Image: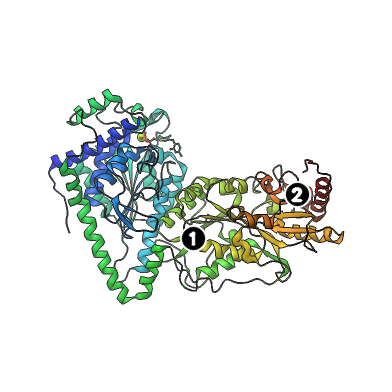
Amino acid sequence: MTTTTGTAPELDGRCITTIRTLCIDAIQAANSGHPGTPIGIAPVTYTLWQRFLRFDPSDPIWPNRDRFVLSSGHASALLWSMLHLTRVQAVDPDYEVLGQPAVSLDDLKRFRQLDSKAPGHPEYRWTSGVEATTGPLGTGAATSVGMAVAGQWLASRYNRDDFTMFDFDVYVQAGDGDMMEGIASEAASFAGHQRLANLCWIYDSNRVTIEGHTDLTFTEDVAARFIAYGWNVTSVADANDLDHVARAFHDFKSEHERPTLVVVHSHIGYGTPVEDTAQAHGSPLGPEGVKATKRFLGWPEDAQFMVPDDVYEHFSNGVGARGREAREAWEAALEQYRAADPELADELDRIQQRELPAGWDADIPSFPADPKGIASRESSGQVLNAVAKRVPWLIGGAADLAPSTKTRLTFGGAGDFEPDDRSGRNFHFGIREHASAAIANGLALSKLRPFWSGFLIFSDFARGAVRLSALMEIPVIHVFTHDSIGVGEDGPTHQPVEQIVSLRAIPGLLVFRPGDANEVAETWRYVMQLRRDPAVLILSRQALPTIDRSATAPASNVARGAYVLMDADGGTPDVILIATGSEVGLALSAREELTAEGIGVRVVSMPCSELFDRQPQEYRDEVLPPAVKARVAIEQASTLGWHRYVGDGGAIVGMHTFGASAPLKMLIKKFGFTPDAVSEIARRRIAATARNTVEETT
Ligand SMILES: Cc1ncc(C[n+]2csc(CCOP(=O)(O)OP(=O)(O)O)c2C)c(N)n1
Ligand SMILES: [Mg+2]
């Protein structure tokens, strides 16, 4: 294997200075950005990439590559410089290598400008070679734990005595801010417990953040904390000491039981006039500062974006050659593997393309009509198990709530993912919602199909990572149960009100609230086929009647987001009731009551408003004919957002306050979710729209 250990120190120095000055120049050109950390930590990034990282710039999505996650996303200039200097190739959304650079010198010159491949923070999918979108501190580090888990799980399923298909390592570069954020602590605790020895976090301890020295606010012993988490902890006294840096990585490579934290003592803005101060964090150095720094670094002070010829070549002979060799060896092994075990090889192909196995949905149950019904968390658990049995890489768990959220895989062989058994498909994430979602993101970035679950009320705790799943366009399945005042006695601390609308506010996130067991089944069928969109499933704790589908439209209409579940007798509705989840059954009961009075009632089930919004106008008008102004939306949640479906002539039966602690029957009365209350509002809307008046109700 080609190695570059022992390269001429001056060439190492030239490469490091090139990285530093590219960052300086890009930030100065943009007049915006964060120079301090890229300058301070560049020797560490350089050493990692050039001497250790198994990453092939000519194929940056090769499945067994080592991952590098820049959790200090504000230091993005560093990543753009590395991607440029190592000549990482661009890959399109269909995973084809394009034959053009991921980040050109021109992109660097247009750092932070519209359409540049070098944006303000690393963005997955936008720039090839970015393993995860980072910027929200702590979150990249937490996401890396999911990648390390994926590495272990893939190794367990696909490695054979003769074949090591997966043995990649996951490296993270993180700063003081990452170490302060709770999500990183949650994830580090999980990683320590799980003994993820393929995980290495590099903590750039420059002791400076935005407001000043960390003495202001962060004086704990981070190393001791990580030792207590069960990590291997090592340190580097001087980021500029390449031998010492390399020794730390050797230390990581020879540790087989624990994840490793490398605490690197560095100087933010090393060699700049603002070294070791908060000014180095987030302001361009200014023309004089740039010159002074280049003089200090022994660089021509007027040179801009200068890359000496031998620098590209050096990277090409280092990380480039090592990565290509490793990738080619892996591909050759895959061909032999394919011959030895075509079925497993086929799985690997499908995983990489985000495709499902043939017959994956063959066991999805269909639920017979049942007025007593079944909780949607319960039917979801059944459907999930039916699907998971046929999709081996559908894996996930709960934030200590599996008995409540029903997401446990219970079939034979599903097992628990543990240090002693990496083949398990059930994860005990512990009471760590934010990390659970970030770990799920890391699993999805590794192309596995993850789900995780918790109570809807605590989706707030996970929101940052849920948002990133949408921003990254990765198909994570977030399962939230106990969806409303339906929770009953636990009271307002556990009764979501504003959570559904706040999830619907996240662009690109598909939020499903299925109305009965068959809608749950169809939701899973739809969601499993998503390759880019993350989805949220919002499920009930209490039983929901299973609708008699012989008298209503089929549940497969879930795929359209909303549909006419049951039309008015005679076909012309006087009023439309629109409902989701547990309120679909309520709408049907109100319909019955009103129909008996000769009122024409259409019930629309709207399990996913985002999907409905994507339908052609024609279909939307069919479901909600513009001429029918009397409309009532019913959802046990904040009313925000419903006006766009009910319009001026409509009313919304929803929650305007927090809930209360009481048996559900009492709450339903108190908050007006009874057939009588809904019918009364419907009657009033019919009368009001007939008079052509607009009156505020509920
Ligand atoms: C969750 C989150 N909160 C706040 C910020 C804003 N922010 C960006 S960088 C930064 C300071 C980070 O300090 P450190 O990690 O030490 O980076 P350094 O100053 O050393 O570059 C803050 C508060 C953020 N990006 N993410
Ligand atoms: Mg810092």
Residue 239 shows up from this direction: yes
515 or 203: nearer the viewer: 515
324 left or right of 673 in image: left
Rendered position, 59 above or below 19: below
Label 2 sits on a secondary structure element that is loop
Relative image position of residue 288 (x, y in whole percent): 26, 23
Q: Residue at x 35, y 40 (%)?
A: 76
Q: Amino acid at mark 1?
A: Gly
Q: Quadrant of ligand 1?
A: top left
- Mark number for residue 396? 1
428 left or right of 666 in image: left
Q: Earlier in the sequence, mark 2 or mark 1?
A: 1
Rendered position, 178 above or below 302: below
Q: Residue at x 27, y 73 (%)?
A: 336
Q: Residue at x 31, y 76 (%)?
A: 340
Crowd rating for badge 1 (residues with CA inside 10 Å; few <14, some 14–19, many 20+): many
Tell me how far mark 2 sits from mark 1, CA to CA: 44 Å
461 left or right of 486 in image: left
Which-is-in-front pick, marks 2 and 1?
Answer: 2
Relative image position of residue 378 (x, y in whole percent): 62, 64
626 or 447: nearer the viewer: 626
Q: Which residue is mark 2?
A: 629
327 left or right of 609 in image: left
Quadrant that contains the N terminus: bottom left
Relative image position of residue 187 (x, y in whole percent): 43, 49
- Disc 1 residue: CB within 8 Å of ligand 1: no
